[in-house]
Structure formats: C-alpha cells, structure tokens
C-alpha cells in the first residue's frame, strides 16, 4: 500500500478516510462551518496539507450523496492537487439549490482520489496519424 503524508494543520482537522473497505475515493472533511449561498459558492478549508509522491496527483471529486440530497458539488471538478503542492487543501463548493446551505465542521464535503500518471513531452508535428473518428467533434460518434 502506498503512503501519502498528511499534515494536520488544526486540532480539529481529520485525516481523509475511505468510508468502506476497497473504496477508491477518500472522504475529505470540512474543518470549518460555512454557509454556501443559494446559487453561489464558497471555499471550504479541510485543515490538512498533503505530501503526494512524485508521479501521482490528487483529484478532488464531488460526493454523490451531497449532490443528490442538497444540490452541492465541487465547482472546479475535478480539482487537481499536484505532487509539489504543500499548502492547505481547500474545496470550492457550489450550491445549485434555491436555499442557502450550511456546512458544519466535520462534514464530508468531497472525495480525494490519488492517481498515477505518466509524464509526457509535447512534440510539434505537421501531420497526425489517421483514426476512425478523425477530426469529428462534439456529437460526432452519434452515441
């Protein structure tokens, strides 16, 4: 199992954790009480900093239950946490409902998914290889 270092920045901060054994996403918890205005957004502190190993990144994703029950989701979903970032993890939540939404300290507000990636090098070319799709854009596949 891979280790990701977590620094608790406040006494009330919580480690990200999986709700169920085998889950891919770890719950992120609010470290503050906040009000998300109707049809507005706010930045919510998690009170943690991460030490994600090089070659990995963190994606901050919405919680389906929060979206379904309260109309709250992650505004910049997915939020990207690069391995070199050592600042506090904060989640930008948006409230799509018609009423203000209260977030309490300790609430599960988002999920964190740690993923590996391969470094790439962009190379300028005059021509690209041919594919079945070709240059067809939005809706081109007909599916």
Image (cartoon, helix red, strand yellow):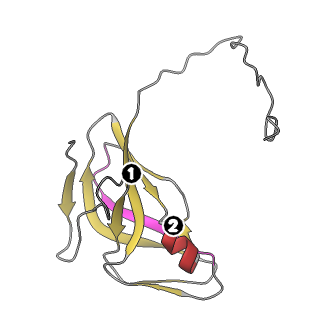
Q: Horizontal and vertical percent for residue 138?
A: 79, 40
* Residue at image mark 2: 64
Q: Nearer the viewer, mark 1 or mark 2?
A: 2
Query: Would residue 3 be seen by someone viewing this image from the given angle?
Result: yes
Q: Is residue 126 above or below residue 104?
A: above
Q: Horizontal and vertical percent for residue 61?
A: 47, 58
Label 2 CA crowd tier, 10 Å (few <14, some 14–19, many 20+): some
* Residue at image mark 1: 113
**Identity of the residue drawn at 81% across and 30% down:** 136
**Identity of the residue drawn at 30% across and 57% down:** 87
What is the tally of numbered marks visible in this picture? 2
**Identity of the residue drawn at 36% across and 78% down:** 107
Magenta range is: 84-96
Q: Do the residues bearing badges 1 and 2 touch, measured as CB atoms within 8 Å?
A: no
User: Does label 1 or label 2 sit earlier along the sequence?
Assistant: 2
Residue 87 colored magenta? yes
Label 1 CA crowd tier, 10 Å (few <14, some 14–19, many 20+): some
Q: Is residue 119 above or below residue 130?
A: below
What label does residue 22 carry, if any? none
Task: Decide if residue 86 is on the left or right side of residue 91.
Answer: left
**Identity of the residue drawn at 19% across and 59% down:** 7
Q: Horizontal and vertical percent for residue 104?
A: 37, 84
What is the distance, in whole Å, between disc 1 and disc 2 at their CAs?
14 Å
SS of the residue under disc 2: helix
The N terminus sits in image quarter: top left
Magenta-drawn stretch, dominant element (helix, strand or loop): strand
Q: Nearer the viewer, residue 11 or 107?
A: 107
Q: Horizontal and vertical percent for residue 135?
A: 79, 26
Q: Is residue 63 above or below residue 100?
A: above
């Amino acid at each position: 199992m891979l280790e990701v270092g977590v620094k608790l920045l406040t006494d009330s901060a919580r480690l990200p954790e999986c709700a169920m054994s085998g889950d891919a996403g770890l719950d992120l918890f609010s470290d503050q009480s906040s009000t998300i205005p109707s049809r507005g957004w706010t930045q919510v502190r998690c009170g943690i900093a991460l030490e994600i190993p090089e070659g990995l990144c963190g994606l901050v994703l919405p919680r389906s239950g929060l979206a379904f029950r309260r109309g709250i989701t992650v505004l910049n979903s997915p939020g990207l946490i690069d391995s070199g970032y050592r600042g506090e993890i904060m989640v930008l939540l948006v409230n799509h409902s018609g009423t203000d939404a209260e977030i309490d300290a300790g609430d599960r507000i988002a999920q964190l998914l740690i993923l590996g990636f391969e470094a790439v090098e962009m190379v300028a070319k005059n021509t690209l290889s041919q594919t079945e799709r070709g240059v067809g854009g939005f809706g081109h596949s007909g599916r």
